[in-house]
Structures are given as structure tokens and as C-alpha cells.
Image (cartoon, rainbow, N blue to C red):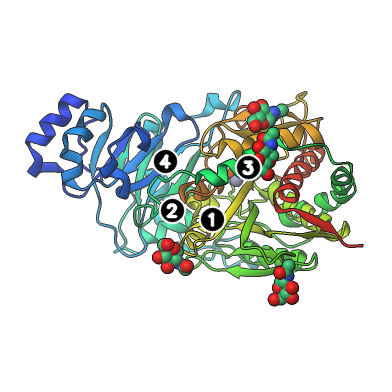
Amino acid sequence: MRRALLPVFSAAVASAIAVQRDLVIEDSLLITSHPPAQLADCLRSSYFGTYGGSAATQDHIFLPPPACLLAEDTLSELTSGSLVPLPELEDGARLVWVGPAGVGAPHAQGVMDVDQSWDFISSRAEMLASASSPSEDPADRQGQLVLSAGQLAHPSTPMLQLVHQSPSSLLLHVPANLVPILDTLLPPHLVPVALPLQPLAAGWDPVPDHLVKHLADITANLSFSPALDKILSEGIVMDDIRRNVRWLTGEAPSGIVSRHSFTEGALKAAHWIKDKVEATGATCHLHPFLAGFAPDVICHYPSLLNSTEHIILSAHYDSRGSFGLVRAPGGDDDGSGSGHLLGVAEAVKSQGVQFEKAVTFAFFAGEEQGLYGSHYYAEHLHKQNTTILLQIQADMLAYHAPGEPLQLGLPESIHTPEATYLLSNLSQMYSPELVVGRTAACCSDHQSFVSYGFPATQVFERNGPIVDPMYHNSGDTSQRENYDFSQIVSIAKVTMAAVLTVAGYQVKA
Ligand SMILES: *[C@@H]1O[C@H](CO)[C@@H](O)[C@H](O)[C@H]1NC(C)=O
Ligand SMILES: *[C@@H]1O[C@H](CO)[C@@H](O)[C@H](O)[C@H]1NC(C)=O
Ligand SMILES: *[C@@H]1O[C@H](CO)[C@@H](O)[C@H](O)[C@H]1NC(C)=O
Ligand SMILES: *[C@@H]1O[C@H](CO)[C@@H](O)[C@H](O)[C@H]1NC(C)=O
Ligand SMILES: [Zn+2]
């Protein structure tokens, strides 16, 4: 069912809306290309976030109080956007933005336009709802979603609805029963980001000035440290990373078929990661965040200085496969980021590193359905008034196109520029083999931290778009051409250098 949408409006149309104010204004979402900083202050407390990896096509979403929307200065600043009625969300339902992940040629040729995507997505949802119960064959069940097709088809459950469509994105009303499997309905090149349930408490407060300055000062004061170089070179071990990635993908005999957030495989991976990282001296907890999802695995290293300032290095351990197939090895997305994080943890132990400030390694779940795991964790940290000095997300580190050099892709948008500069400077010092550039590859867990005003950035495998032919595909294993473990090692040296530099460290004698 499509909702009647107000057309995209110009300033003139906005004035007309103002005249007919009774018609439209109450409980309407404003979706606009204007970033919050360009808009009236009265919108501040109604901000629901910024979506999309390319600044040119980003959506900024608000739920403006009518008086704010109709105020002279609001209208004069709004030259484009849409007002759409806020749907009533039943228990457990979510609004989810869906947009391009940033997939490039040659695969871009098969990429459909966003306006064709809705028909595709809704027909898949209908197919799933009419599917028979899952196989009872135990061999299949390993990878089968824990949720049964019966639950999906419950006759009283509402259908997926299109709330808004722009040339580059969709806004969906996702009923509770589809929240866990929205990823399986999307074409591979589209990714979901769930809107928060309330406006972001931080408004659009940027990162506090003193934290930005702190990172900029660290970068300006950097000098090559032979001691740090030795820790990185001796600590990050490619064979260990390879072994860990292959355990996660099921290429090694772990029995894991999928790490989709609703599979047994994800739970098995969570417990295994917890044990692995605890063996390196951290204390890990399984953090449940939404019913039925596999938990986040949050691992803390003790701070020598009892510091309340935190540095977070993260990846997502859940995975996404092809429509209709249970296998989801997630070797690159994001076995590579998870394997890199385990590799850094092992280096902490083997090199006797002790951190001066508080360091957290976070393995998120629910990323593929809309960044749920990281959102809940960032929200929790915000509520606790936690000081985060730096957060880095590692998502897809292994793949580069045939013949391309080793690369480090840093975000074009949705990041803290000073955090990104710190990484590019460290890369030049400790992994000079990496060609550093920018990417619009979109929507990983650092976005949740940016939303809450924490300094955050991302590391990615390429300068430019995603070209991994196995992206969001059941063929995403590590034993294939151009899956490059040496690139994971080089990037791990950069992220570990950043954590040690910002946290401060000592080496156990
Ligand atoms: C180095 O860091 C200090 C703060 O520790 C800062 O005052 C100084 O400006 C930085 N140096 C440079 C060259 O920016
Ligand atoms: C940190 O806390 C522990 C236990 O409370 C205490 O023994 C230690 O002296 C503290 N260290 C510093 C540097 O304050
Ligand atoms: C966080 O800070 C706010 C505002 O200063 C305060 O009201 C709140 O109690 C603090 N929360 C915690 C958990 O310390
Ligand atoms: C290092 O950081 C500065 C900003 O502090 C930036 O201008 C410069 O381009 C960075 N250098 C490299 C090699 O990334
Ligand atoms: Zn990913």
C-alpha cells in the first residue's frame, strides 16, 4: 500500500503549504537535502539523522513541530524537500532508510534504479510471506533463520510499506516481523539504516571542539616510532587472521553456515569471539539489544590510568547472503573486519601491550538489518555521558580489483575529518604500501557514533566504490581471487597504531 505523498516542494510550494496548514503539518516527517547546520534552530530537537554516503545525495530527516516548520526563517531556508505523514508504528515496527551502498562498475550495470527497487522489494516480501515452512532437515537448519516462515506469514501482520521515495533512497515502514530479515528482501546494492525511535538526543551537535582539537593535536605531533612499528610488524600475524576469518566463514570446520543475526551461526560466532578476545586480556560481555538478534560482543581492556576516556575499535560480525540461500559466509563483509579485530587483539597479548586509557573492541550484530547493534551501543554510551576520544569501524578490508595496489579507503562523508586525517597520517608511517584515498561506500556502524556526536571514522578496502562481485552474496568466502589477506594486515597495522597512539600504552617487561 502506498501512502499519498506530498510532492517535493520548493520555497513557493512551502508557502502554499503554510496557507493550508491544517492539511499537512501535524506529525509530518521533513526529508530534505539541506544539512541541519543550514536550517533553522527550531529544528534542532526534531533531528532524526543524516543518511547516505555521498554528500550530494544525502537525506536529512526531521519531525518538525508545526510552529517551527511554518516559521518564516524555516521556510525561507528550505528550497527543497518532502513532507510525508509519519506512519503510526505498531509495536516493534521501525522506519528504515534504504539507499545505495556505493557499488561501482562493472557491477553497477546490473544495479537497478531506486524507483524500480520498491517493486522488487515488495514482491520479494510477498514471496516470503507465501513461502512454506522451513526445511526440517537438520543439515539445512544450521543456516536457516531462527524465525520461521510461518511467523512471517501471520495473516494479521501488516505489510511492508513505502513511506517515501526519492531518486536515491526509500523510506520504509517495516513491520516487526520483517525487521529481522529486511536485508534478505533488498537487492545487494541497497543497504538499510533504521531511524531512531526518538529524535537524536544530541540534536545535531557536532563533536565537541576540545575532542576535535585533541585528535588534530595528536596528528600534528605524530612522529615515527620504531618501538610502535615493531609492535605492529611482529604483532599482526597474517596466518592468525586467515585462520580466524575461515572459522567465521565456515571454510574451516566450525560448522557455521551463516552469521545472519537470526541464525545459530551468529550465536556460535558471538561466544567464540568472546572467548578469543578474553584470552588476550580483555573482559567481554554479550550485549543483547533487540529481541531475537544475536548480541553485540563488547570487550574492554583495563586502563592503567583508571581513565574514563575511551577508544573504540569495531567491526560487525553478522553477515548477509543471497536471496533464498541460507549460506552467508560474510568473508569480506565483514569477516575481514572481524578477523582484523581479532588479529589486533592477539597482537595486544603477544606484544604485552597495556593501555593507559580505556580501550574497547566491539563486534556488532544487526548491522545488515539497519545498524541496530551499534545504534543501541552508541545510544547507551551517550546516556552514560561517556567520553569517546575515537571510534573506528572496520568493514570490508580484503577485496580490491584485479591488478590494483593495496589500498585504504577512508570515508567521504559521515565521519569526523580529524579522525580520518589521523588514520591517513598513520598509514603513511606504518603501512606505506597502502594507497590511501576516499570512498562513498555507505552505511556502516561508525554512522551510529557520528549520530550521537562521537568522533568516528571508518576503514574500507578501496578508494572508490564497492567492486567486490560477492558483495552481499552467498559466495563471499575468503578463498577466491583478489581476496587479499595482506591488505587486511596492512590496514590492521593502521587501526592498531591509532588505538595505541590515542590510548597511550606501556609494554609489560
Ligand atoms: C602538539 O600537542 C600539543 C598539546 O599536547 C598542542 O598544544 C600543540 O599545538 C601540538 N603541536 C602542534 C605542532 O600542533
Ligand atoms: C587505579 O585503580 C586501582 C584500583 O582501584 C588502584 O590500585 C590504582 O592505584 C589506580 N591507578 C591509578 C594510576 O590511579
Ligand atoms: C549525563 O549528563 C546529564 C547532563 O549533564 C545529566 O543530567 C545526567 O544525569 C548524566 N547521566 C549520567 C548517567 O551520568
Ligand atoms: C595528515 O593530516 C593533515 C591534517 O592534520 C592533513 O592535512 C594531511 O593531508 C594528512 N597527511 C596524510 C599523508 O594523510
Ligand atoms: Zn558490512
Q: What residue is disc 4 on?
A: 50
Task: Tell me residue 228's x, y (percent).
Answer: 84, 46
Q: Are marks 1 and 2 in contact (CB under 8 Å)?
A: no
Q: Secondary structure at mark 4?
A: strand
Amino acid identity at mark 2: Leu
Q: Position of residue 114 (x, y in %)?
A: 40, 32
Where residue 421 is drawn, which disc sits there?
A: none
Front disc: 1 or 3: 3
From this viewpoint, is residue 103 visible? yes
* Residue labelled with disc 3: 215
Q: Amino acid at mark 3?
A: Leu
Residue 383: percent from left, percent from top: 46, 63
Give 406 or 145, whichever is nearer the viewer. 406
> Where does label 2 land, which residue?
128
Q: Residue at x 29, y 62 (%)?
A: 90
Q: Which residue is mark 1?
A: 374
